[in-house]
Amino acid sequence: QVQLVESGGGLVQAGGSLRLSCAASRRTFSSYARGWFRQAPGKEREFVAAISWNGGSTYYADSVKGRFTISRDNAKNMQYLQMNGLKPEDTAVYYCAADLNVADLRLGRIAKIHSWGQGTQVTVSS
């Protein structure tokens, strides 16, 4: 049973942009904080961005501040990650996530996060 599904990944040149989307299959996720993580081969899954349940607060990893923007549309059960100024080091599988506590997301408490998508590949060429 799939709860979250990512889309929008692909291949882009350095300096380009991509917009990732994550659709939730359950409307109850509208009351959950939402986030994005990424994982490159040989590395641990790392926090990228998070947003509170009502969109009032956002959080970003230092590596993406000023380049990435997280947003959500609760009426559509959607979350987004706008990625601008992409760099080769952004190459990874990107996962969307949902959790009742935004701290679990922004602090990278992987084992406590309620739901995950299956991931979408983002590849940035130099």
Image: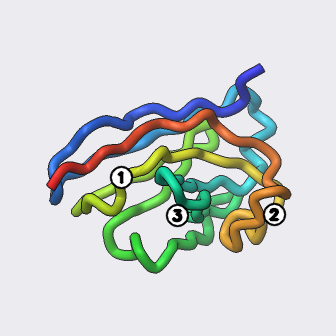
Task: Examine the rendered structure and indicate whether residue 35 appears above or below residue 60.
Answer: above
Q: Taking 34 as reference, is 8 left or right? A: left
Q: Nearer the viewer, residue 112 or 22?
A: 112
> Seen from this angle, which residue lies furthest top?
1
* Residue 116 x %, y %: 70, 41
Question: Can you tell which of label 2 and label 3 is closer to the viewer?
Answer: 3
Amino acid at circle 1: Thr
Q: Taking 59 as reference, is 85 left or right? A: left
Q: Residues within 10 Å of mark 2 (few under 14, many from 20)?
A: some
Tag 3 or tag 2, which sits nearer the N-term? 3
Q: Nearer the viewer, residue 8 or 53?
A: 8
Q: CA distance from mark 3 to mark 1?
A: 12 Å
| Local SS, label 3 | strand
Amino acid at circle 2: Asn
Amino acid at circle 3: Val
The residue tagged 3 is 48
* Residue 29 x %, y %: 75, 41
Image disc number at residue 101: 2
- Rendered residue at 32%/68% (across/down): 67
Q: Quadrant of residue 27?
A: top right
| Local SS, label 1 | loop
Quadrant location of the N terminus in the rendered image:
top right
- Rendered residue at 33%/55% (across/down): 83
Q: CA distance from mark 2 to mark 3?
A: 16 Å
